[in-house]
Amino acid sequence: MEKFFFLEGAYLILGGLILLVTVFVTTRPFMSKGAVKKGLFWVTLVIAVMIGSHYMITINRMEEVKNAFEKDLPIICESRMQRKVAQIVNIQKSKEWFLEGDDFVSPNYSRPFFSARCIVK
């Protein structure tokens, strides 16, 4: 569950804000009587489906990346250290990379790379 909140935390906050806007709009005098229930139901359903599917897609991609790494296939991760040059880093098990939990680490780099931000080449 900790991984869910870590990966989807920002989207949960945005979803909460959208629900607050929905409550505000549906409680205005010009809205019909059942608008609050209908609005909250449908908006909550859409947000839950979107966040749930994003989480499942991200978890599946992370597993795919980890399996490819164990097979020594090249992995591409985004690098936020340099924004102008070398925005990606090629990761491979045979090039002194290790997997610690969900992070790729190397003695040649000062920071780890999170597997959710990587794809198989």
Image (cartoon, rainbow, N blue to C red):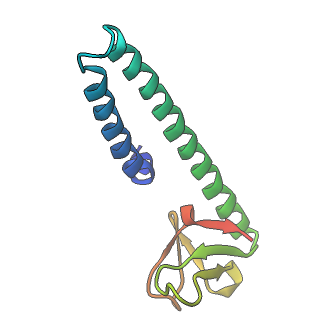
Q: Residue at x 67, y 87 (%)?
A: 95
Which quadrant, please, contains the C terminus?
bottom right
Which image quarter: residue 39? Answer: top left
Between 40 and 111, the one nearer to me in the picture: 40
Depth check: 5 or 21 in front? 21
Relative to 35, is 57 above or below?
A: below
Q: Residue furthest top?
A: 33
The location of residue 8, given as percent across then percent down, is 43, 48
Percent position (x, y) of residue 54? 55, 45
- The picture places residue 79, in percent across and down from the top left corner, at 53, 79
Q: Residue at x 46, y 84 (%)?
A: 81
Which is nearer the eye, 53 or 114? 53
Residue found at x 32% / y 17% = 36
The vertical placement of 86 against 72, above or below, is below
How many labels were placed on the picture? 0
Left of 50 or right of it: where is 75?
Answer: right
- Indicate the quadrant where residue 88 lies: bottom right
Looking at the image, residue 35 lies above or below residue 59: above
Image quarter where the N terminus lies is top left
Left or right of 98? Residue 24 is left
Near-viewer residue (34 or 119): 34
Q: Residue at x 55, y 61 (%)?
A: 116
> In the shown orientation, is residue 64 left or right of residue 85?
right
Measured as percent of width and height from the top left, residue 29 is found at 23, 16
